[in-house]
Each structure stands twice: as C-alpha cells, then as structure tokens.
Image (cartoon, helix red, strand yellow):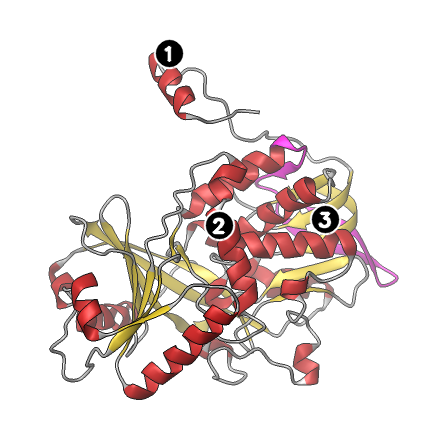
C-alpha cells in the first residue's frame, strides 16, 4: 500500500515521479461476496472502508456503474457543516464533522479539509430569533456556534451590501469549524484505504437487477455478470428510485437536479462559506480562486446531470443582491448532480422489507457533508443489523408513524426541502 508524506513527495520529485502507483486495483468481480455495496460514490466507499476498518469485514465488492467520482461525490459545492436544529439531525451531522476533522490523517490522503467557517446571514428579527434557536441547539449537541452582529460582520466580510434596504443585513450565525473539502479527493482517499484492506472496487459495472427469491435478496445482476452476496447495500443517491424500482419498491423519494457553478479565478476574497438568508445562495472560494456557489434545485423531476437557465438566473440574482462586487465576474462552468429528495428532507439508513437488502438515501442537499457519518452508520447497520445511535431515527417507518424529521418545516413536498 502506498503511503504519502512530505518526504515521499520530495523523493518522487528527485526521481522524476516514476514511483507513484495506482491508488486502487482494477479487479474482476468474484462470483460471491459477503457484502455487495451498490454505488461507488462517497457514501458507498466510506461504508466499505468502515466495514473493513471497524468490523474487519473485507470480503466486499463496491459496484460503480461509471468511474469513481463521476456521480454526486464529484458534483457538489464541497461544503461541510453541522449547523442543524432538530435533535434527530444535529448529533448526526456533528458526528460527521468530527470525522471530517481527522479524515486526512486516518486515510493518509490530502482531501483538503479547510475549516474556514460557515456564515449564515440573517435579514430580519424573526430570522435572527430562528438562528439563535438553531445556535443553541448546536451548542447543546457539542457543536460550535456564535451569533455575530453587524459590526462583527463588517470586519469579517466587508464586501457584503450593508446598505441594501430591501434585504438589510442584521447579523449572522457563525460556525468556525465548518468549511470545505476537495470532493473527489474524498472518494479517492476512501477508495485507497478500502482497497488496501481487501475490498474489491469494480468500476464500469452497472447493476441491472437485484436478485430476490422468497422475500430474500441473494445478490445482484450486473453488466459484468451475476454476483451473489449474503447482504446487499444500496446507496446510489439520485438513482435510488430506479434501482429499488427494479424489484417493485417505491421509495418516499423524488429525484431533482441541483446545479453548481464556478466563476473564473479571482484573488482571495471569500474567507469561508457564506449563505444568503433572503434567498437560496451559498458561496465559497476554491484554492484556484474560483467562486464555487449554488442555490435551489430545479423544481421538476429529472435524472439528467444538467439544469436549466432560470435557476442559473435565480442563483446569480441572489449572489449579486448579497455581494454586488461579483456582478462582473464571469461564469466559467456549471454542472448538475441528481438529488435524492425525501418527503421530509432528511435521510434514510435502514433495512428494507426484503431480507438482506439495505438502503441508504434521501440525502437531499446534505449528502456530501454527511459522507463520513453516513458510511460509518451504514457500515454499523450492515454489520450488526442494528441502527447506529446517531442514525436511529433515519428509518422508513417514520413516514408511517408521523415522526417526520422536517428541518425546514416545509411539509411532505420533496422539492421544497
């Protein structure tokens, strides 16, 4: 297994960089495994890693229909945070943030974890009161949070439009430990360490059917042949309904496109992550200088990794209203990720009604920041058949029992979460 260090980089530079090796193997699938994970994105790879590391289960295959990083793990705005309100959500995302903080050392891979802070701007007294409540909930779960007034904001982010009478800036909720991570490097790091522990990562291997007999899942049918398994874990984000629909399971999930945008490279100006409280706009600045930003999902159902122009206009309008200085920056590129939007805006990590078939999905906007905790908790479920304590509320039956985890208070309309 290749180990990285400053000395290794220096040595390879002197050797003409001839000693670097692939991070993971390219194996052919075996006929059977103990666990098959459908989906080689961040959640699937993290699940495989924690199964191997924490539960010593290594006879695992991760099946990815494309290449690693081709899905949502490489199509997001890279933000990590734990600024949630509800007691079912906040401890889980705080657990995820603590895993992020040690991820580079644990995986021996530079995923560029940058805890530059997340700032949520508020524009009214009622919004301030809501953010105070959220900040207190964060502090009660062990997270960090502080309320900043206008004077503090003028020192931290002086380029905001403090004279905007339509959207007056009255303060912000600040989480210093939030920030950004290099998204595809997360996939590569988890893949590297899972492979080193014996996990087979099989790319360009699409699952065409789930094999079920007498109410029990015993494997998958793929473009590379039939693979049997004692347990099958599905975590395919926006393709969840398509995969589970192959055996007639209807999920409380809709698929929508979430667009992201990058501007041309600019001099360093954005200190961390900033969100607009009077609209849906969030922005950070990459190490290359580009502004990385996004906003609302496209309201219609779609499996396409591209969006439409009205959303681009809406997102840019929100950005210019908050910080007019970006109005002359040129947009470099856009892309879309397929969001698995649940009915209440919160995820599902649970067993299905089919024995030995497990599901992880419904992450809405929160999938990337949840990657470590999602993998950790899903691995716990697959290994023990019991939900992890921090994910014990993310079950299918909450929709039957009326125990919705509606962070935004929008009701059972997926495109509003």
Residue at the image position 43 percent from the left and 42 percent from the top: 111
Q: Residue furthest top?
A: 15
Q: Which quadrant of the rendered structure holds the N terminus?
A: top right
Residue 119 in the figure: left or right of residue 182: left
Residue 219 placement, left or right of 325: right
201 within the magenta span? yes
Q: Image quarter for residue 33?
A: top right
State the image quarter where residue 59 is shown. top right
Task: Write the residue at 64% across / 60% down.
Answer: 243
Q: Using residue 221 as the reference point, say whether residue 138 is left or right of it.
A: left
Tell me the element at label 1: loop
SS for dot 2: helix
- Residue 129 is labelled as none
Residue 310 position, x and y percent, is: 28, 72
Q: In this view, does 386 lie above or below 42?
A: below
Q: How far is disc 2 from disc 3 in space, using C-alphas? A: 34 Å
Q: Mark 2 vs mark 3: which is more N-terminal?
A: 2
Q: Position of residue 27 (x, y in %)?
A: 64, 30
Please provide the residue range marked out in magenta.
196-224
Is residue 368 part of the magenta span, yes or no?
no
Q: Distance from label 1 to label 3 (Cα)?
A: 45 Å
Which residue in the structure is indicated by mark 1?
15
Cβ–Cβ below 8 Å for labels 1 and 3? no
Of the numbered discs in the image, which one, if any, rests on residue 221? 3
Instruction: Give SS at disc 3.
Output: strand
**Mark closest to the chain's N terminus, 1 or 2:** 1
Instruction: Judge by depth and name the residue closer to the eye, 401 or 170.
Output: 170
Any part of residue 71 in sight: no
State which mark lies toward you, 1 or 3.
1
Q: Can residue 257 be seen in this view?
A: yes
Residue at which label 2 appears: 100
């Amino acid at each position: 297994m290749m180990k990285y260090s400053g000395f290794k980089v220096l040595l390879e530079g002197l050797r003409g960089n001839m000693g670097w090796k692939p991070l993971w193997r390219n194996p052919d699938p075996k006929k059977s495994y103990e666990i098959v994970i459908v989906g080689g994105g961040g959640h699937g790879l993290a699940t495989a890693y924690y199964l191997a590391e924490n539960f010593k289960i290594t006879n695992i295959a991760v099946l990815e229909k494309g290449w690693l990083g081709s899905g949502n793990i490489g199509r997001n705005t890279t933000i990590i945070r734990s600024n949630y309100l509800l007691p079912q959500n906040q401890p889980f995302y705080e657990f995820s943030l603590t895993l992020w903080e040690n991820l580079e050392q644990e995986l021996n891979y530079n995923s560029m974890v940058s805890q530059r802070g997340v700032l949520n701007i508020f524009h009214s007294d009622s919004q301030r009161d809501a953010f105070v409540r959220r900040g207190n909930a964060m502090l009660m779960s062990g997270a960090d949070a502080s309320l900043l007034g206008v004077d503090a904001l003028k020192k931290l982010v002086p380029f905001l439009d403090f004279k905007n009478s339509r959207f007056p800036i009255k303060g912000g909720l600040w989480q210093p430990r939030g920030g950004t991570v290099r998204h595809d490097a997360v996939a590569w790091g988890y893949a590297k360490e899972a492979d080193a522990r014996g996990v087979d990562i099989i790319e360009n291997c699409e699952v065409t059917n789930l094999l079920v007999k007498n109410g029990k899942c015993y494997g998958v049918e793929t473009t590379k042949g039939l693979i049997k398994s004692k347990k099958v874990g599905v975590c395919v984000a926006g393709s969840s309904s398509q995969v589970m629909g192959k055996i007639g399971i209807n999920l409380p999930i809709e698929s929508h496109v979430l667009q992201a945008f990058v501007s041309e490279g600019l001099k360093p100006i954005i200190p961390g992550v900033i969100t607009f409280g009077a609209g849906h706009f969030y922005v950070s600045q990459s190490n290359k200088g580009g502004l990385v930003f996004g906003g609302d999902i496209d309201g219609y159902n779609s499996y396409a990794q591209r969006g439409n122009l009205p959303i681009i206009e809406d997102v840019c309008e929100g950005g210019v209203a908050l910080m007019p200085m970006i109005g002359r920056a040129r947009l470099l590129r856009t892309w879309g990720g397929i969001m698995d939007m649940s009915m209440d805006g919160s995820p599902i990590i649970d067993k299905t009604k089919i024995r030995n078939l497990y599901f992880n999905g419904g992450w809405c906007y929160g999938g990337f920041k949840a990657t470590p905790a999602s993998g950790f908790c899903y691995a716990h479920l697959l290994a023990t058949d019991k939900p992890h304590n921090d994910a014990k509320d993310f079950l299918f039956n909450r929709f039957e029992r009326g125990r919705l985890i509606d962070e935004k208070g929008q009701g059972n309309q997926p495109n509003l979460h």
